Image (spheres, rainbow, N blue to C red):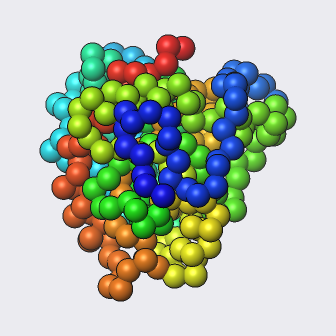
C-alpha cells in the first residue's frame, strides 16, 4: 500500500488495518481531583517550579521534549537556560545525544519550554522520573506538549529522515501510570487530538517536508528489537518503534493537555536489516534531520489549539 504524504487528503493510513479513530474529538475533563498520584507529583515538584518561576523572564505556554540527538544547532537562541544538574532533585540525562538542558525560547512568537533530553525506564528511572519534565512543564504554565523522538521504521515503506506524526500508540513497556477514575475511561478517546495533527500536516505539506501519519510502538529497551519482535509489531499495526514517549503522553493527557507526537525515522528497525543497529547511527541521522524536525516543531507550536 503506498504511503500518503502530507497534504494529499484523507488517505493517511500507514498500516494495513483501519485504525480506530473516534468520530468525535473528546477532551478529557480537566485534572480529575481523584488522581492522587498526579497530585503527589505536582506537590513533589512545586517548590522547584516556584523557584524557576522567579527566574523565567516569561511564562511558557507550551513545552517540547526533544529525543535523541534532536536539538543542536537548529534551536533558536534561548531567552533563559539551565542544565538539569542545576535543578534540585531533577533526574540527569545519561544517554548520549540528550544534552540535559532546560531552555525557554520563543517559537512562532510563543514562549515555549524546551527539555533537551528525556528520561527512559531503561536507564533505571522510575515512572515518576520519566514524566518529571511534563509535570514541571505544566507547573511552569505549559498547557500543550510536543513530544519528539527518534524511532526505527517497522513499516518498510518508511525511510531514515522521514517524519511521522503519531496518530496512535502501542505501549509494550507494560508499565502504566497509577492514575485512576475518569482518566481510565477517557484516555483512549481523547489523546493525540486529530484537529491539531491535521492543521500541522497541512502546514508541513506546504513547506515541502515529507510527513506521514502512523502508529508508534513503545518498547522497554535498552536492546533494539529482535526480528521476531519487529514482525510482531508490524502485525500489530506499528509503523515506528522507540523506547520512550508513551508515559509522557499519558501524563500530559491526565493533566488535561493536548499533545502532538513527532517521530523522526532514524533507521530501519533492527529486524528489517542485515547490519546491527547502533546508537551512533541513530544520532547521526537525527542530527542530519534536526533542522527539518525543528521546522515541524515550530509549525506545531504555531498551530497549537487554544486552551
Ligand atoms: N528501536 C527502538 N528505539 C529506537 C530505534 C529502534 O529501531 N531507533 C531509534 N530509537
Q: Which residue is pictured at 32% across the width and 53% down the height? A: 162
Residue nearer the viewer, 278 or 14 = 14
Q: Quadrant of residue 111?
A: top left
Q: Which residue is pictured at 54% across the width and 74% down the height? A: 230
Query: Is residue 120 visible in this depiction of the protein?
Result: no
Residue ranking furthest to the front: 1
**Horizontal and vertical percent for residue 171?**
64, 57
Query: Is residue 70 visible in this depiction of the protein?
Result: yes
Number of numbered discs: 0
Q: Which residue is pictured at 30% across the width and 61% down the height? A: 160
Work out whether 146 lies above or below 97: above
Residue nearer the viewer, 259 or 85 = 259
Left or right, 39 with reference to 119: right
| Quadrant where the image shows the C terminus | top right
Residue nearer the viewer, 270 or 2 = 2
Left or right, 201 with reference to 83: right
**Horizontal and vertical percent for residue 180?**
81, 39
Work out whether 86 lies above or below 223: above
Q: Which residue is pictured at 62% across the width and 73% down the height? A: 232
Residue nearer the viewer, 9 or 234 = 9
**Horizontal and vertical percent for residue 277?**
35, 78
**Horizontal and vertical percent for residue 293?**
29, 43
Amino acid at each position: 500500500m503506498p504511503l500518503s504524504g502530507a497534504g494529499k487528503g484523507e488517505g493517511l493510513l500507514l498500516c494495513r488495518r483501519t485504525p480506530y479513530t473516534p468520530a468525535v474529538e473528546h477532551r478529557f475533563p480537566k485534572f480529575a481531583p481523584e488522581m492522587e498520584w498526579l497530585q503527589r507529583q505536582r506537590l513533589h515538584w512545586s517548590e522547584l517550579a516556584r523557584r524557576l518561576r522567579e527566574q523565567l523572564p516569561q511564562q511558557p505556554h507550551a513545552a517540547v521534549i526533544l529525543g535523541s540527538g534532536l536539538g543542536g544547532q537548529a534551536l533558536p537562541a534561548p531567552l533563559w537556560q539551565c542544565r538539569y544538574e542545576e535543578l534540585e532533585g531533577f533526574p540527569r540525562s545519561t544517554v548520549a545525544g540528550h544534552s540535559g538542558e532546560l531552555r525557554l525560547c520563543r517559537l512562532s512568537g510563543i514562549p515555549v519550554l524546551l527539555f533537551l533530553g528525556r528520561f527512559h525506564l531503561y536507564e533505571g528511572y522510575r515512572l515518576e522520573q520519566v514524566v518529571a519534565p511534563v509535570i514541571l512543564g505544566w507547573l511552569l504554565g505549559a498547557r500543550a506538549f510536543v513530544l519528539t523522538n527518534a524511532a526505527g521504521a517497522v513499516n518498510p515503506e518508511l525511510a531514515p529522515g522521514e517524519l511521522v506524526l503519531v496518530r496512535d500508540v502501542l505501549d509494550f513497556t507494560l508499565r502504566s501510570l497509577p492514575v485512576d477514575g475518569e482518566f481510565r475511561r477517557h484516555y483512549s478517546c481523547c489523546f493525540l487530538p486529530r484537529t491539531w495533527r491535521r492543521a500541522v500536516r497541512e502546514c508541513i505539506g506546504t513547506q515541502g517536508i515529507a510527513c506521514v501519519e502512523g502508529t508508534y510502538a513503545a518498547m522497554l529497551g535498552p536492546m533494539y528489537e529482535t526480528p521476531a519482535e519487529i514482525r510482531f509489531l508490524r502485525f500489530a499495526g506499528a509503523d515506528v518503534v522507540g523506547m520512550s514517549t508513551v508515559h509522557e503522553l499519558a501524563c500530559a493527557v491526565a493533566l488535561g493537555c493536548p499533545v502532538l507526537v513527532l517521530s523522526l525515522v532514524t533507521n530501519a528497525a533492527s529486524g528489517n536489516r542485515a547490519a546491527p543497529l547502533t546508537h551512533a547511527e541513530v544520532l547521526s541521522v537525527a542530527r542530519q534531520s534536526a533542522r527539518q524536525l525543528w521546522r515541524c516543531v515550530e509549525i506545531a507550536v504555531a498551530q497549537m489549539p487554544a486552551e
